[in-house]
Image: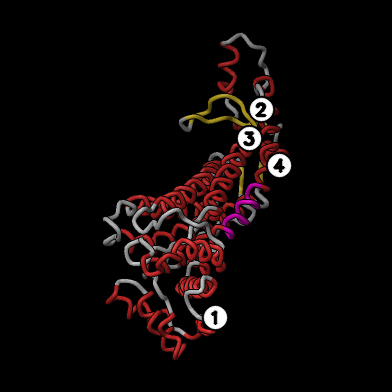
Amino acid sequence: MTPFEAIFVPGEAAAAVSDRAWLEALLDAEHALANASARAGLIPADAAAMIGAACVADLYDANALAAEGRTAGNPVEPLVRAMRGQVGEHAEYVHRGATSQDILDSAAMLLAQRGCGLIDQELEAVAGRCAELADEHRDTVMAARTLLQQAVPTTFGLKAAGWLVAVVEARRGLGDVAARLPAQLGGAGGTLASFADRGIELLGLYAEELGLREPVVAWHTLRIPVVELGGALAAAAAALGKAATDVVLLAQTEVAEVAESAPGPSSTMPHKRNPIAATLAGACVLHVEANAGLLVRAARQEHERGAGGWHAEWAALSTALAATAGAAAAVRRSLTGLSVDRDRMRANLSPDTLSEAKRLGLAAERPEDYLGSTGALIDRALALHRR
C-alpha cells in the first residue's frame, strides 16, 4: 500500500505481507515438501534435513530473488537454484517433482492464513467495542436517517448493534474461509506424474506439513480459493466501512453527535476535530474493494497455467490483507473512547421525526414512544456476539 503505508497499516500487518514474509512462506513450503517427500519415501531423510536447514530466510536476499525472477516470471525458480547451492550433494532433492506455482500458491495460502489471524484479532476487538456501545446506549435516542434525511426516532445503541452484527458475521465468514485454505501440489501439469504412484499420498502429507487443507485436485487455474478469500476480505472491509462512514457523518460539525477520542489536527485550522481514524478506515476499505475485485477478475485463467492472471494475484492479495487489517485497526481506534453526545442527539431530533407515528394515530408525544422493538433487537445482536 505504499506510499506512506505506515499511515494506513499497522506494522505487524505490513510485516505479515512483506517481501520477507513471502520469502519465509516460500521456504516453509519447500521445507514442507521435503519433509513430506521423506515421509513418503521419495527422498532420503538426511536430504530432507539438509533442505530444512537451508530454509532460513537470512540465507537469501528477497530483492535479489525478485530481480532474478523476472526472467522466469516468479521468484521460486531463482530461490530453488539458490537452495540447491546451499545443500551440496543433496541438490537434486530440492523442489523435487514440484512446479513453481505449487510453492508460490502454498506460500500465498500460508501468508493469507497468518494475515487472517491478525485481522481476526482486530475484528474481535471491534466487535467487543460495538457490543459495549450497543448496550451502553440502548436508550440513547437519536434520529434515524434515510437518504441522509431524518426519518423516525431510533437509538444509538441500535445503530451500534447493526455494526456489531455486520462485523460478527463478516468475521465468521473470513474465519471459515481461512480455515479451508488449501495447499497446492500438482507438478508441471497438475497430474502429480513426477511422484509416480505416490502422488496422492504425498499430497496429503504435504498439506499436513503445511497445516492447510488437502485439495481434491490441483487448483493451478481453478482459483476459487483465492476468489473466496477476496470475497471474505471484501465483506469484512464492508462491515468496517459501514461503521467508519457512520462515524464520519455523525462527527460533522453541523451534526456533532459523536467525536473520536483522539481527533486528528488540521495543519491550518486548529479548531477542527477531524475523525481521522474513521477516515483512514474508509481509505483502506477502498483498497480492499479494488484488490478483491482484481482477485475475482484474475480468476479466469487459461488451461493448466495462467498467463498473467496468476501473477497479478500476488500484490492484490497482499494489499487486500494489509488494507483489511488497516481498516479494522482504524475502526477499533475510532470506536475506542468514542464520545457520544446524548444531549446533542436529542436536540437534533426534528419534530417531524414523530410525524409518521402521529399519522398512524399512535400516542407518540416523545421520541421514546416510537422506538418499537429497539431493545429486543439490541439483545439479539448481543446474543449473536456471545455465541
Question: What residue does disc 3 label?
Answer: 345
Task: Say what amino acid the circle numbered 2 marks.
Answer: Thr
Coordinates of residue 78 in the picture (x, y in percent): 36, 80
Task: Say what amino acid the circle numbered 4 marks.
Answer: Arg
Residue furthest out toward the right: 136
* Element type where label 3 sits in the image: helix
CA distance for labels 3 and 1: 70 Å
Question: What residue does disc 2 label?
Answer: 374
Lower position in the chain sequence, tag 2 or tag 4: 2
64 to 152, vertically: above or below: below
Coordinates of residue 33 in the picture (x, y in percent): 48, 71
Residue furthest out toward the front: 197
CA distance for labels 2 and 4: 19 Å
Q: What is the number of the mark on residue 386?
A: 4
Task: Say what amino acid the circle numbered 3 marks.
Answer: Met
Q: What residue is at 60 percent from the left and 51 percent from the top?
A: 123
Q: Is the magenta stretch mostly helix, strand or loop?
A: helix
Q: What residue is at 56 percent from the left and 11 percent from the top?
A: 359
User: How many labels sit on residues?
Assistant: 4
* Element type where label 1 sits in the image: helix
* Element type where label 4 sits in the image: helix
Coordinates of residue 47 in the picture (x, y in percent): 50, 83
Task: Say what amino acid the circle numbered 1 marks.
Answer: Ala
Question: What residue does disc 1 label?
Answer: 45
Query: Which numbered mark, 4 or 3, is in the foreground of this view?
Result: 4
Query: Which numbered mark, 3 or 1, is in the foreground of this view?
Result: 1
